[in-house]
Amino acid sequence: MPAEYPLHLGPTQTSPRDAGFDPAKLDELDGHFRRLLQAGTIQAASYLLARHGKVFAHRSLGQLRETPAHGDFLPDSIRKVYSITKMVTAIAVMQLVEQGRLCLETFACTHIPEIQNPRHNQIQVWHLLTHCSGLQAEANFYGEPYPHEWFAGRVKDNWITAALAGPTEYEPATRSSYSSIGYVILGEIVARVAGQTFEAYVEDRILKPLGMKDSCFFVAESRLDDVCVTNDFQLEQLQRRAPLHGIPQAAGGMYSTLADLFRLGQAMLNMGELDGARILSRKSVEAMTRNWLPPNTESYYWGARYKSLEHGLGVQTHSNYGLVSPGSYAHEGYGHSALYIDPSEGLVVAYMVPNNPGWSQEAVIAPRGIIWSGLR
């Protein structure tokens, strides 16, 4: 790893000072990431900060791949954002709800006959969106490791039957545990209701309208060299041209850039609209971003056990979460990345901290304290 990590600057629309942000905090954030790079905790880091619709910071440092020969990680480099995809899946579901083609209270078995059995037939769409369906949680879900056996695609016949194998962990809405399988089921529901693949639906109804031109589920061969990967398994995933075993990429399959994540976040901050394109109604955004879990729902989530946890539809809601304002919402992704929307501050924050060793609080959580402390 190089001793020095040049800082690359992406396009911005205003200055930090004019955005009401302390410029010294950007230097502090850059220094924080440099220390993590030097320690080998992360391979690269990038971030985009925007307030009131204007980008005031857009930076990156580190390497695109494990060896320097592939070049630097740039502000417009493409990276798989894994579970941030779940926010997009939830938007697709809400669009179908708005069209009257789906209801949040719909039983999943209505659209997927394999779920019509005594163990699973009480699971409703909103249970899947909030991780309280009782379906299998991530293997060792206290830390949400990827790839685990199911996610690696070791399914030979009917992937739905395989996903539903084994007992449910609890009755729907009585507990919550992080389950990507639930979101893959949602992707299949979207596909069956819409009459096209999940990936095609998202591209037609979300990515294209929002102008997320660098976001996709299968990267074009002409762009492969622009994608950041940190290990051979990610490289193998990158080279696929279609879903393995037909499994919808609804839980964590989207590739994106900081600029595209900003467009997604700003559309949510604008209550469903960006640059004249409306992807959701105001009421859908309000529904997505309020807590849906019953009070005192015991939850197992992101490395911890909670006596009570909030969760919206496809987003994590935050009433009391460090310096982040009450009413904020977000989703993080393995590998790692994050998209935060803070309506109180008019703030959208996207960052990527590609790493191979595993989850790091310093890399994933600590940047929030630096960023939010810079707001004036």
Image (cartoon, rainbow, N blue to C red):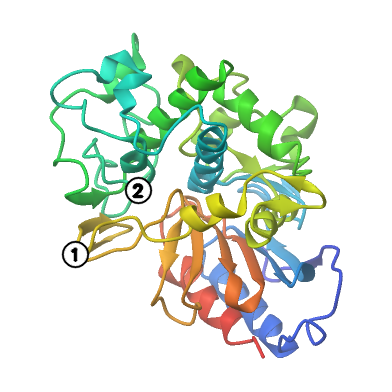
Q: Which residue is painted at 63% across and 20% down in the image?
A: 241
In the orientation shown, which residue stands out farthest toward the front?
100
Disc 1/disc 2 C-alpha distance (Å): 14 Å
Where the N terminus falls, by quadrant? bottom right
Report x, y in % for residue 177: 25, 49
Q: Is residue 282 left or right of residue 125?
A: right
Q: Residues within 10 Å of mark 1 (few under 14, many from 20)?
A: few
Q: Is residue 249 visible?
A: yes
Q: Nearer the viewer, residue 102 or 274?
A: 102
Above or below — where is 124 with respect to 43? above
Residue at (49% x, 33% y) in the render: 250
Q: Is residue 137 left or right of residue 371?
A: left
Q: Position of residue 234 (x, y in %)?
A: 53, 37
What numbered label is drawn on residue 296? 1
Question: Which quadrant holds residue 14?
Answer: bottom right
- Name the mark on residue 74: none
User: Any mark on residue 130, and which?
Assistant: 2
Question: Please, is residue 113 above or below residue 4 in the view?
Answer: above
Tell me which numbered mark, 1 or 2, is placed earlier along the sequence.
2
Residue type (three-letter) at the residue carrying disc 2:
Thr
For badge 1, the amino acid type reads Asn
Residue 7 visible in the picture: no
Image quadrant where one finds the C terminus: bottom right
Residue 340 horizontal side relative to residue 129, left or right: right
